[in-house]
Image: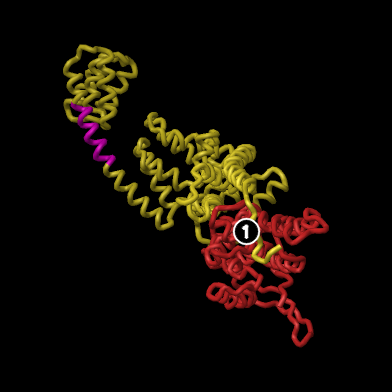
Amino acid sequence: MDAAKLLRQAIQAARSGRELTARDLFLDIVHMEPENEIAWTWLSGLLDPLDDRIAACERILSINPENRQIRAYREKLLVEYEVERQRKIRELDKEVKQIRRFAEDGKHEEALLLLQNILREDNRHKEAWLLFADLSANINDKVRAYKAIVQNDPSDKSAKDALKRYRYFQRNPLELAASYEEDGELDKAIDLYNVLAIQAGTTSEFERIHRKIVRLEDAKIENLRHIKPSFTILRLSVGLPLLYILEIFIQEGLNPFKYPTPGLWIGIPLVVLGSFLLTVAGIRVRHAIWRRWFGQQGERGSNAMRALVAVAGWMLVLTPHLLLMWDSFLRLQSFQIPASPWGS
Amino acid sequence: MIPINDTEPNRYSWFPFMTISIIAINTFIEIAKPLYLPDDMTFLQYWEFMMRFYFTPKLILAAEGPGIASSITSVFMHGSFFHLLGNMGALWVFGRRVEDACGAWRFLVFYLLAGISAGLITTLVMYNSPIPNVGASGAIFGVMGAYVLLYPGGRIRTLIFISFVPTWPRIRAGWIVLYFLGVQIIPALDMMFNNANYGVGYWAHLGGFFSAVFIFLFLRPEAFARYLSDTSV
């Protein structure tokens, strides 16, 4: 049957209220004649989802850019589409919030299933992707989630950083497990270590991972309290500056106003920084300096970087101490030894 | 009452590198001291030695002499060979597991902090004293205090003579430390109020002991988590 005859039948069907038949016929026509403006015009009113109607309008405008009626109609559809989209987003936001509460109750698997449904409906929903990335223990899922967020909004810097980090973790899954451990998510860490133990290539690698699993299981049995890495770094950074301040205090006769040596006080920030660097290099916890200064996406630092930072830390700590010892040495040079209270 | 050994094993590390190093340094200094001092040494020469390497409260307060350098060197000085033996024995008994809970380098910093704090307390209390002091015992008392804080249930194999008969029961560390602390208090107060001179740095011992609270700044993350979780460190 030729297109003109089909067109007549389709218009007749549309006018007599047989919309589905008419829509199928018009679709056949545009299949045969993709540039048929009349068929596309009818379709722009008959298609069901708003975005299909908008697509039909855009097709008409590409065939005939002068079609003002269709242009105005497309504008109207776009407004409707936006209103509809906002309403949908609000609904989905509500659903995501509910799912988050669900996940907080420990029902991770169910929450993930519900999230996947939402994402099938709207794969641009950022909150849903973020929650999905957070809940899924699978590193590939996390990469997929952040990839989608970046695709939808290429200007989202934090998502880009997260994507980079998780791609790094894809290549170094042991570090991801260690991160879970640091965040106190022992179950997640054990699950991942178990997967990695199965995938281990050598016996020694398997044993290394197995030891970590045993250590974490022991920690779970002991019910160890989780301490934030930032607090640990702060706590361990205090000791050396405290020692240095005590030393200056003694050097100044316990009275910095009477016997001031400002040169030694300048050493305090150096010791504080040095102590911080030594702590960060000495304990295997995440810190942003590894990413910012050395581009280490896992935020943990390789052994070589740690050694480098430790050397810098020691230098910063030892330099003020050496100056302090030099001050002591100079004082000793001019020291008049007092007489013994017991005579000679 | 002589503490001999802590029978519990280490949890985090197998070798107490820093404890043994500190014992070695102290022993070396005690052996090297006669080599440094002349054979026909006069009391004046020994006095000059003490003024340089021991800390003297009056000099510290007047900001005279070597200052902090003498506070640090005094942490590695002993009055006699038996003084060294007693201190290093206690360091071995109590230091091994404290080092295990901290890690070697942090343990060294804690040890110095305890020793220097001991000197500071002595200076504050005996502010007018021209007598030079050694400070190793203060650091050892700091280690003992830290041990009791970290391992309150720890038991120490201790040599006790009952009517000249030796026995070596395992006694709770708390009782041992309480005993050693108890024998410091009366002479310390006597020194403070009556200017008594026992030739022993009782205030340094007490100062070192109370500086043990700083141990929490040096514990490994796992040991600190265990301490907060009320499980064995």
Q: Which tint was used for chain B?
A: red
Q: In the drawing, does residue A286 fall left or right of residue A54?
A: right
Dot 1: element: loop
Quadrant of residue A222 within the rendered picture:
bottom right
Q: Residue at x 44, y 43 (%)?
A: A133
Q: Position of residue B14 (x, y in %)?
A: 72, 58
With respect to residue B90, does A177 lie above or below?
above
- Label 1 chain ID: B
Q: Is residue A285 visible?
A: yes
In which quadrant of the rendered image does the C terminus of chain A lie? Answer: bottom right
Q: Residue at x 41, y 50 (%)?
A: A111
Q: Position of residue B39 (x, y in %)?
A: 83, 57
Identify which residue, B153 or A190, lies in the foreground: B153
Q: Is residue B212 visible?
A: no
Furthest residue toward right: B39
Q: Which residue is mark 1?
A: B55
Q: Position of residue A197 (x, y in %)?
A: 64, 49
Query: Is most of the magenta stretch helix, strand or loop?
Result: helix
Q: Residue at x 36, y 39 (%)?
A: A126
Counting labels gives 1
With respect to residue A265, does B2 lie above or below?
below
Question: Mark 1: which amino acid?
Answer: Phe
Q: Position of residue A330 (x, y in %)?
A: 61, 44
Q: In the drawing, does residue A112 fall left or right of residue B206?
A: left
Q: Residue A299: within the magenta?
A: no
Residue interval drawn in magenta: A76-89
Q: In the drawing, does residue A237 fall left or right of residue B100?
A: left
Q: Which chain is yellow?
A: A
